[in-house]
């Protein structure tokens, strides 16, 4: 198995864990979206808050240039830590939700 396919499988496995946690939340429909063609992976929640529709991208990761980009991560422990636990090196993880100025001071990939 090549590295890209390995990363796809790990990202799906990590998202599956969070999807299972989030789908237990009342008053929200939770969906996991995995598109290996565009390499976009998301957990999305939809529902109603009083009279207003709520659509929230809980987690959003993508694969680009051999790296995993984390676009959105509101988890307490951090999706990056889960990826590291699965063997992904920090140098292959981009914390896209952080500004480039902060990213350059971390141990993670710049982009």
Image (cartoon, rainbow, N blue to C red):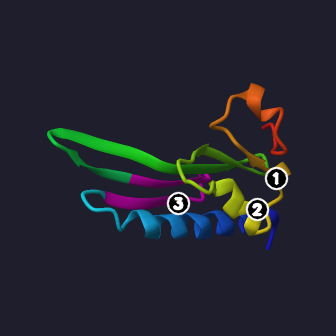
Q: Give the side of residue 79 with respect to residue 26, left or right.
A: right
Residue range corresponding to the magenta coloring: 29-44
Q: Earlier in the sequence, mark 3 or mark 2?
A: 3
Q: Which residue is mark 2?
A: 84
Mark-to-mark CA distance, 2 and 1: 7 Å
User: Cβ–Cβ below 8 Å for labels 2 and 1?
Assistant: yes
Nearest to the eye among marks 3 and 2: give it: 2
User: Cβ–Cβ below 8 Å for labels 3 and 2?
Assistant: no
Mark-to-mark CA distance, 1 and 3: 22 Å
Q: Which residue is mark 3?
A: 34
Main SS category, magenta section: strand
Q: Which residue is mark 1?
A: 90
Q: Earlier in the sequence, mark 1 or mark 3?
A: 3
Residue at (29%, 43%) from the top-left corner?
54
Residue at (78%, 46%) from the top-left corner?
65
Of all residues, the one furthest to the top in this rendering is 101
Q: Residues within 10 Å of mark 3 (few under 14, many from 20)?
A: some
């Amino acid at each position: 198995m090549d590295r890209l396919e390995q990363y796809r499988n790990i990202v799906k496995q990590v998202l599956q864990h969070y999807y299972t946690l989030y789908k237990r939340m009342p008053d929200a429909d939770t969906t996991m979206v995995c598109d290996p063609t565009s390499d976009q992976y998301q957990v999305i929640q939809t529902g109603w808050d009083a009279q207003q529709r709520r659509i929230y991208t809980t987690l959003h990761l993508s694969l680009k240039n051999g790296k995993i980009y984390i676009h959105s991560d509101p988890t307490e422990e951090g999706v990056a830590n889960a990826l590291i636990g699965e063997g992904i090196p920090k140098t292959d993880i981009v914390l896209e939700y952080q500004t480039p100025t902060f990213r350059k001071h971390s141990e993670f990939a710049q982009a």
